[in-house]
Image: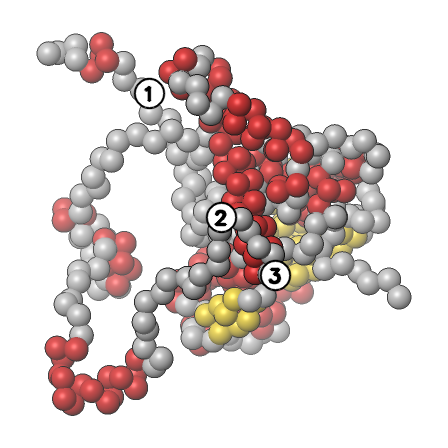
Amino acid sequence: MEVTPKHSPLGASICHRWWECPGSVALSAKMPEQETSFPAAEGTVAHNVAEEALKQMKKGKKFDIYSQIGNTYMEGDHEIEVTEEMCEAVIVYLDEIKRETHRFGTGWNFLSIEHPFNLRADKEAWGTNDASLYKPYDFVHVWDYKHGQGIVVDVENNKQLMYYALGAIQGKDVDRVITTIVQPRAYHPDGVVRSCEYTVSELLHFEDNLKKRIAATRKPDAPLKAGSHCKFCPALGDCPEVRAETNQVAKHAFESVQLNTSDQMVKLLEMTPRIVDFLKENEKQVKIKAERGEEISGFKLVKAKSNRIWRNENSVINKFRPVLGDSMFGKLKLLSPAQLEKLGKDLLKKDELLPFIDKPDKGLSLVADSDPRKAVDGVSPQEAFKDV
């Protein structure tokens, strides 16, 4: 019996990758299944908590999300604990859906939660929407919850969201689709809830292009293309395009950077993240070989450094506090501004802490254009010393 894979090889979450690099699909298919990272495992648990909360709310039942704090779940090799921070992030997502559901008066019956779909574009194009709200003869609203804080996701022309939108409108009579990203733990100038609206005709045009891109992935000579989309690609360590970039850099490794032109320096800067990822993947694969018993010339496996920890803090406190008293606890440390604002949100006046807060200027950072922060003009030496 044919087993359906857990994730589509042409799925929405990796659409941005194979859209730019058609050859990545075939190359990734040859790779062994990747281990789940801690952030990915944490995101899965957060999604599961949100899903259960929405399902209970749809049934008209109260759901105390804070009662989940302390629960632990195994995701891959990671034990993930539901924390207060996770619950508060999920609440932002739940509140957004509740507000929109009530605002349009459609009722919970028109809300779909973790709804699977198959696109007409291709039999291997399928997935699951986090949540979508249907208002007959008007619109479908599609939400995508992002628990991550390392990579800020834009909503405009987001291929993953447009892919989800295509799945959500199937069998429905609507004129438009609203796509929304909820990413509570990452800064974006447009806020943690960001939306973009499309007409159905715009999505059907996207579907036509989607079909062409899918067809390109199936060509025997499907091209490989290195770029920012390489991050998290399972074939990164075996990709000849990234390897070629690494070789290109290695050839010039001992040349003076100052002799490079600005264009050459920018090109190296653009390649740096994926070359670093390539080298990390190389290190990971060498470690796996060593763990399997292969002798690695010049290297050896040793026990990783770790600090001693208490097996159970409460047991230690109950046993030794009568003898050692409060001296067994460390010195009190003032909470950070963000933590104190959170603690006093119902006890302090709005902005009462502001006169006590400073934000040091740590200079400038060079980042990609895609970074959501506002650009700052550089200052020439002439400008800097004009008043001296």
Q: Residue placed at 53% from the left, 72% from the top?
A: 73
Residue matched to label 2: 298
Figure disc tally: 3
Pick whichever, 384 or 64, lies toward us: 384
- Which marked residue is nearer to the observer: mark 2 or mark 1? 2
Is tag 1's residue or tag 3's residue first in the polypeptide sequence?
A: 3
In the figure, is residue 172 to the left or right of 52?
right
In the figure, is residue 239 to the left or right of 181?
right
In the figure, is residue 40 to the left or right of 91?
right
Question: What amino acid type is highlighted by mark number 1?
Answer: Asp
Q: Residues within 10 Å of mark 1 (few under 14, many from 20)?
A: few
Q: Residue placed at 72% from the left, 59% from the top?
A: 6
Q: Position of residue 135 (x, y in %)?
A: 67, 52
Would residue 361 be visible to someone looking at this image? yes
Q: Residues within 10 Å of mark 3 (few under 14, many from 20)?
A: few
Would residue 175 be visible to someone looking at this image? no
Q: Residue placed at 26% from the left, 63% from the top?
A: 343
Secondary structure under badge 3?
Answer: loop
Q: Position of residue 137 (x, y in %)?
A: 73, 48
Pick whichever, 339 or 363, lies toward us: 363
Residue matched to label 1: 377
Residue matched to label 3: 292
Secondary structure under badge 1?
Answer: loop
Secondary structure under badge 2?
Answer: loop
**222 lies above or below 95:** above
Pick whichever, 234 or 147, lies toward us: 234
Is tag 2's residue or tag 3's residue first in the polypeptide sequence?
A: 3
